[in-house]
Image: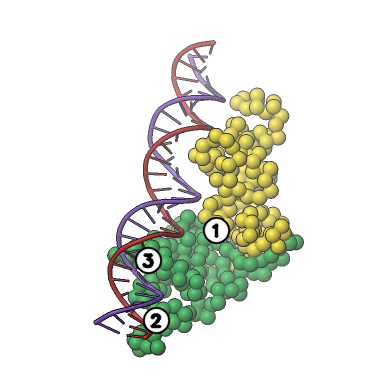
Chain colours: A yellow, B green, C purple, D red
Amino acid sequence: MIFIEIVKMNNDVNKKLLHKGVKPTSMRQLVYEVLDKQKKALNLYEIEQQFDNVDRSTIFRTLKTFQDNCVIHRIDDGTGAVKYALCDENCTCHLGDLHIHFLCIKCGQTHCLKDMPIPKMDLPNGFLFKSANFVVKGTCPKCS
Amino acid sequence: MIFIEIVKMNNDVNKKLLHKGVKPTSMRQLVYEVLDKQKKALNLYEIEQQFDNVDRSTIFRTLKTFQDNCVIHRIDDGTGAVKYALCDENCTCHLGDLHIHFLCIKCGQTHCLKDMPIPKMDLPNGFLFKSANFVVKGTCPKCS
DNA sequence: AATTGAATGCAACAGTATTGCAAAGATTTC
DNA sequence: GAAATCTTTGCAATACTGTTGCATTCAATT
């Protein structure tokens, strides 16, 4: 067995990564923790700022791995840089898990509105729904 | 009077630009026509490709002028480049005019679903709605 | 025709995303 | 436990999109 030693550490983050099928390296653990601590979505630059000497490409590829394994989801909020937020533990990154995101035009923070799922829609004839990126813009509770 | 001569040309595009308060230069007319002919939204690069020798910055500033005057609206469909599509003639670029956009993940084309307005939403406490960017991804009639 | 202001083209630059390659680390095989 | 193999990481370079400064051209006014 590959991961026995790491699992023995009984570390929550490692367990969660394993549960999603991602080998929990130290970088991955740290990036996960950064995203977990923040209650908002972060872009690549903001994550990079949380570290002293970690290369951007490493974080970039870590995030890619996370996306491929439904650890995080990406949010195009129109600010120019894609943001990332942790998926729920039982998220499968399928339709039912999609929710609306909110970008505050004052502070720039982007929040997951997990209570607001993407509604079912009747698309025009011939259009097939696969995924969606719904971003509402306005002011957040702190800035309103 | 400034625009008499141009108006006399009795050109539809010029009339439409004037109606939105944009002085109809030849570049603006051409860019408008490019967007009008396509039934899909185009990004800066795609528009540039329609011309032989027009600078990107010129088109960029033309598009900016168009946005400022509600001639076109921008669409962040997550493909990396912002796309642009003509507004309806009576569009005021306010809330009621917002609609859902559709990105085909096979052909990459983005369409305005003008019959699908952004629905009213009850946001969580403290969140104020100002604008929205809703993009549905899937396959379009041609690719389904 | 001269003057003024707006629009355009050129060039350079900034920010984000992405890749190739080599070094370091982890895992498996013998 | 050492060698071989595969994965992850760091460095460097690059691509792509968006944006701005400045000089020139073009249109409108005097």
User: Which disc, if any, is residue B14?
Assistant: 2
Which three-letter amino acid code belongs to the residue tagged 1?
Gly
Q: Earlier in the sequence, mark 3 or mark 2?
A: 2
Name the subunit of mark 2: B
Q: How far, Cα to Cα, is label 3 from label 2?
A: 18 Å
Which three-letter amino acid code belongs to the residue tagged 2?
Asn
The location of residue B120, given as percent across then percent down, is 67, 69
> As displayed, is residue C18 above or below residue C26?
below
> As displayed, is residue C15 above or below residue A48?
below
Which three-letter amino acid code belongs to the residue tagged 3?
Thr
- For the residue pair B102 and B5, the one nearer the viewer reads as B5
- Image point (69%, 26%), residue name: A8
Q: How many marks?
A: 3
Disc 3 with disc 2 on a shared chain: yes
Disc 3 with disc 1 on a shared chain: no
On screen, residue B23 versus residue C2, left or right, reads right
The residue carrying pointer 2 sits among few (fewer than 14), some (14 to 19) or many (20 or more) residues within 10 Å by Cα, namely many
Residue B127 makes an appearance in the image: no
SS of the residue under disc 1: loop
Query: For residue B96, which quarter of the picture?
Result: bottom right
The location of residue A4, given as percent across then percent down, is 65, 25
> As displayed, is residue D1 above or below residue A133?
above
User: Which disc, if any, is residue B58?
Assistant: 3
Residue B121 makes an appearance in the image: yes
Q: How far, Cα to Cα, is label 1 from label 2?
A: 31 Å
Q: How far, Cα to Cα, is label 3 from label 1?
A: 23 Å
Provide the residue designation for mark 1: A78
Quarter that holds the N terminus of chain B: bottom left
The location of residue B129, given as percent across then percent down, is 66, 66
Q: Nearer the viewer, mark 3 or mark 1?
A: 3
Query: For residue B59, which quarter of the picture?
Result: bottom left
